Image: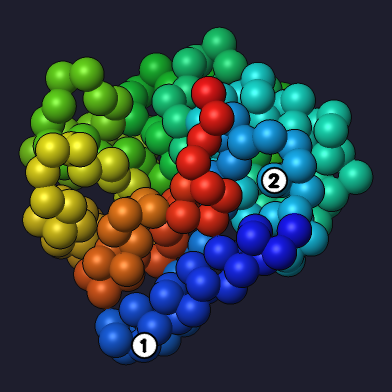
Amino acid sequence: MSDISNTHKDVLAKLTAASKRAAQSALPTLVAVSKVQPDARIKDMLAAGQRVYGENRVQEAQRRWGETFANHRDDLTLHLIGPLQTNKAAEAVALFDVIETVDREKLLKALVKAAEAHGSMPRLYVQVNTGAEPQKSGVLPDELPAFLTLMRDTYKLEPEGLMCIPPADEAASPHFWLLSNLAKANDVAKLSMGMSGDYETAIEMGATSVRVGSALFGAREY
């Protein structure tokens, strides 16, 4: 418990300091990335007071938050931060409060259908492939305005924010700068960017939420 509690306090302190340097009016949201973490670490993080979690896979999240820690679910905010297959849209809509990886029209259709059946729609972020990496999900920057117009006009969905995962072998700050400018140009309010190694930089460049895993929990045990 003490290790998790201390790392949680340390990350929050760094997050707060970065927010002050950026003169942000509100603290960015700390999304604790809980994918493949053992239940003992999740239990300790809950005890430390962390209430916002990010998951990469629908099935793993269902087991964790629908079964093992189901008694905590009503007190938490869950973000889906991994790619979403359309055949998992209904399950994702039922479980998550925020879906950060909207990236194609087929998924928009599936989410609308799932939300109509479920009775509510999670808050949505559009994932932007800022590095134009062929192996990575996300809307290309040049195609973002058209995608947002489609999302807003055809599907009547207003994105809460934009999300990006910079290329692992490049400096992150140019990608954060690009995402921030895309958000301003397209009237999108929030930015999900920054992970364990660069969340302070992301906050200084306008992130309203950061997705932090190993800096909070320690190294993952695959």
Asked whether residue 173 appears in the rendered view, the answer is: yes
Q: Residues within 10 Å of mark 1 (few under 14, many from 20)?
A: some
Per the image, the residue denoted by label 1 is 20
Q: How many marks?
A: 2
In this view, which residue lies farthest toward the right?
71
CB atoms of marks 1 and 2 within 8 Å: no
Pointer 2 local density, CA inside 10 Å: few below 14, some 14–19, many at least 20: some
Could one spot residue 155 in this view of the protein? Answer: no
Amino acid found under the numbered disc labelled 2: Arg
Q: Secondary structure at mark 1?
A: helix
Nearest to the observer: residue 97 or residue 172: 172
Residue placed at 21% from the left, 43% from the top? 166
Q: Percent from the top left, x then y, of residue 6?
A: 61, 68
Foreground pick, 162 / 192: 192
Location of residue 140 by image quarter:
top left
Task: Name the residue type under label 1.
Answer: Lys
* Residue at the disc numbered 2: 41
| Label 1 – label 2 distance at C-alpha | 29 Å
| Of callouts 1 and 2, the N-terminal one | 1
For the point 47% across and 23% down, the residue is 84
Query: Residue 85: which disc?
Result: none
